[in-house]
Image: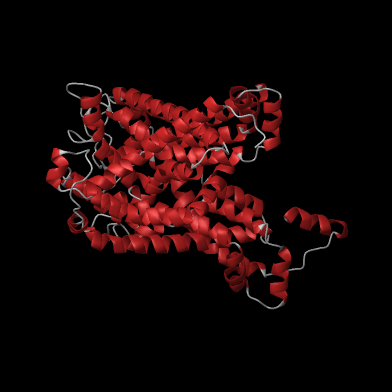
Amino acid sequence: MQANHSAVNAPRRRKHIRTFPIWIVFLCMLPGLLHYTIFRLFPSAMTAVLSFTDISGIPGSSWSWVGWANYKEFFILQNIRDLKASLGRTAIYAVSVTLIQNALALLMAVILNGKFLKGRNFARAVYFMPVILGAAVVSTIWKLMFSTPTGPIFLFMKNVLGIENPPAILSSYTYAFPAVIAAQIWQNMGYSMVIFLAALQNISADLYEAAYIDGANEWQVFWRITLPLIWSAVTVNTLLAIIGSLQSYELIMTITRGSFNTATLGMMVFATAFGGGGATASGGTVAGMRQGYAAAESMILFLGVLVVTVISQLVMKKMEADS
Amino acid sequence: MGKIKNIPFRVFCYVLMVVFLFIYLFPLFFVANTSIKSAQDYMLHPTALTSTWQFGNFITAWNKANFGAYIGNSVLYTAVCTVASLLLSLLIAFPISRKYIPCAGFLYLLFLCGLFLPNGMIPTFQMVLNMGLYDTKIGYMLVMTGVNATSVFFFTGYFKSIPRELDEAASIDGCGYLRYVLTCIVPLAQPAIVSMGMLSMIGVWNDIVSSTIYLTSEANYNITRGLFVFTGQYSNDWTLTAAGLLIVAAPLIVVYIFGQRYIVDGVMAGGLKG
């Protein structure tokens, strides 16, 4: 519509009539600009500043500059074990969520894009629903599913798989973390799927028609036609999943509160700053309200996300150029 | 339909779709089934279909988790934050899309940056604390309101489809700017506003992180906190937990059933920005 409109006007190069006085326009923008500056830009910048202090979350307590002490503590001092564990865990979380979530989402999107499939709109609506439900509800659903000894998963392991003493998944140092990852994927698969579906619907049916007439099978069609044509959606979904999973801790916080070896760096930032029962890798609880230290952790997380995002963007571009 | 039929492939598609439907529907079904069981029935036969119809669970859960008090807060937070965020975003996005102000491109980038910057949770907390707004409804709503990058992006794109001549006609006829935006642009951009409004509503209703940080007195709790108190204190009472869960989820499910198209549109727009 816009394109037509400017094409019609283009030859005349008509100058736009002056409309509303600029000061009124600006005045109306002002509340939004102020709110954004005060509650978004300023706190972002201040995170870096606070990371060099020992400020606490307790009102009225004094604070002082501590230089690089917070960073030194994170990288060098007694936390080295926690550091390795939490960084490793954050990496495992991000990589497994990104890969599995996108692989499943792509698979389901390709399947639901098949016009012959009855009930595909219903299925799409169902797969997307957990995105709407949010962390509080989703975490409670999975606490119920994993509960011991009456949860369906416990009973499945015991009665169907015949495991004699099935572990209590959510209070197990081995299984709690994979369970949280599974819940995260269950919640967000529909989100990635919808973005893939949008991209798939832009592919012309003629292309598939031609390929099938030439005797290609579904597998070849997927690799030669579908995937290259939706590569931008693959890139977007990968980036969103990486950024999202590196930073997100809502499900971890609501399911295990970071205990049982489930605390990623994002969870540690929250637990260090606000308490809330988050635990470090070694099992001890993090001293809550150490907000200067939490700000330093937050900066480390931010820089990590930045580096990973830039690298993955470059890799995706390279893969696109190669294919 | 001139496609050559590949029967095994179609069977494969159906099987996979049904398996995933099971993975997604079973937990919801299990919650619903548990919510109407008696506690004893659940302990004896947790996975069996319910033999009783204990709708009293919902009343017990409602009272135990104090939802009656929290639901009012949640409605207030959701309404105020959604309307405020939409209004602020509209008034930012419209002049940017029309380039009515200098450096519109720069402002646009500034808002997109919001997607990548560190979230600033700690300085925001310090600020709210020092302003004396900690554990107040106003403080919480100030934090939860926001000009979000996705809305600015979505609205800016949408406004471009509204002809500029309309602005010119309105201003020649002497229509004020604010009145023009609210009475002419808002109805024309209704689908975009509904999409972003629903995403914002869902976000505020579901919030658990900011609520945990900023609200400490029960008088200010939102509904998800009720669920939290519940699973902590009565963690073995799964029938009540399930009932409480459905109380929190019910409004979301209703919104989803009626607004699915708008919500999905909003998410697709969010995904395409990258």
Q: Residue at x 27, y 52 (%)?
A: B225
Which corner quadrant holds the C terminus of chain B? top right
Q: Please indicate, yes or no, whether residue A111 appears anywhere in the rendered image.
A: yes
Q: Please state which of residues A107 and A97 is positioned toward the viewer in this rendering.
A: A107
Determine the residue located farthest toward the left in the rendered image: B40
Instruction: Tell me if B196 is positioned left or right of A279 in this view.
Output: right
Q: Is residue B70 above or below residue A179?
A: below
Q: How many marks?
A: 0
On the image, the x and y values in percent for residue A31 come to: 51, 63
A42 or B88, which lies in front? Answer: B88
Please indicate, yes or no, whether residue B224 appears anywhere in the rendered image: no
Quarter of the image where the N terminus of chain B is located = top right
Residue B30 is left or right of residue B206, and the answer is left
Q: Where's residue A119, x and y in %?
A: 48, 42
The image shows residue A104, relative to residue B150, as above or below, that is above
Q: Quadrant of residue A292?
A: top left
Q: Quadrant of residue A216?
A: top right
Query: x%, y% of residue B78?
Result: 39, 60
Horizontal and vertical percent position of residue A19: 71, 69
B118 relative to B6, above or below: below
Q: Is residue B127 left or right of residue B225?
A: right
Q: Nearer the viewer, residue B213 or B241?
A: B241
| Residue found 59% across the figure and 72% down from its top | B183
> Observer-nearest residue: A61 or B167?
B167
Q: Which residue occupies the extreme bottom position in the image?
A: B174
